[in-house]
Amino acid sequence: MHPSFLFQKPEFLKRQGSYILLEESGIRIALFGEANLFSPARAPFGGFEFEAGTGPVEFSRMLNCLDEYAAKNKIESLEIVLPPDAYCPERSGWVLDLLSDFDYQLVFKDLNFHLNTSTSGSFHSNLHRSERWKLKKAEREGFGFKQIVNPDWDFVHAFVLASRERKGYKLSMTKTALEDSFFSFPGAYRVWRVDKDLECAAIAVTVTVCEEIEYIFYTADDLKFRRYSPVVMLHDGLFKQALLENRRILDMGTASLMGEVNQGVADFKRYLGGIEGNRICLRKSWNP
């Protein structure tokens, strides 16, 4: 079985630590921890990987297999962060229904946003008028979007860190970890910039989750250029790149943390044309 998502590939899983791979009826899950399990260890999501052709019957067998494994190994609990529901909309409904039937309880529901490049039309057509005006202003002022093929990771990390700290957020990866991911998964981690007269105004780090999905991992801007809202141009460039690469989804990431919505971030992603969805965390206890 070959996983379709980067975060579920063996080479990515190994970097998160030791794990148990449980497989049944064409469905598998990587389990981290000991008595209290979780999936993933360090990634935006984990959960189940499905072979083509698997459905509710096979998934029920997998959940029974998990119950048997838990009983045999004295497992107390399992916490799972599922992929955003937009990744596999044809499957997400019955997956959640069956998990509920097997007594998995909601831990939190994060608000996730994405752009559907196959049905959304142009990026401009879905922008709020205020963001469309900012984009046109940045274009008139000579701002430009480009990929950075050989990033200076000291600069990239410092730029993103400064932007996030200014907004009261932490950075989930160190400079070393980010740089290591870039070289360990060639072509999967990429860096993009919006410049004005060779000066960096905004940066994005994206991850190719699979052939159909590009995930915007980090965005950051320089306060000096805030009135031009260069992050809008950043998304415009990423949307156009996704079209060129035949991506189906440009995942804009969450606007919440463990279910607590940041309304300002959510509104901004809506203004960019983002489509709302969920990224759900569930938990089952065998020995409460």
Image (spheres, rainbow, N blue to C red):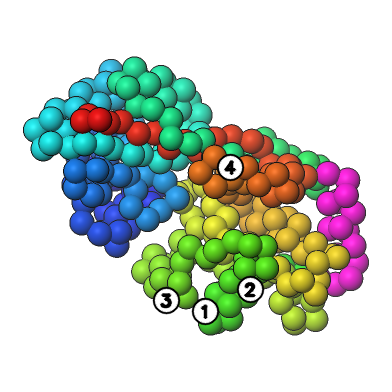
> Farthest residue in the left direction?
72
- Relative to residue 159, is residue 96 depicted above or below? above
Image-based side of 139 in relation to 85, left or right: right
Q: Residue at horizontal 42%, vertical 46%?
A: 45
Q: Is residue 59 magenta?
A: no
**Disc nearer the start of the sequence (4/1):** 1
Look at 32% across and 44% down and name the residue there.
Answer: 39
For residue 153, the mark is 1
Q: Nearer the viewer, mark 2 or mark 4?
A: 4
Q: Which mark is residue 162?
A: 2
User: Looking at the picture, how far across and down is residue 227, in whole percent?
Assistant: 86, 65
Question: At 20% across and 56% down in the image, what residue appears?
Answer: 18
State the CA–CA distance, disc 4 to disc 1.
31 Å
What residue did someone put label 4 on? 260
Instruction: Measure the alpha-carbon separation of dots 3 and 1.
Output: 8 Å
Which residue, given by chain and number where applicable, does mark 3 sit on? 176
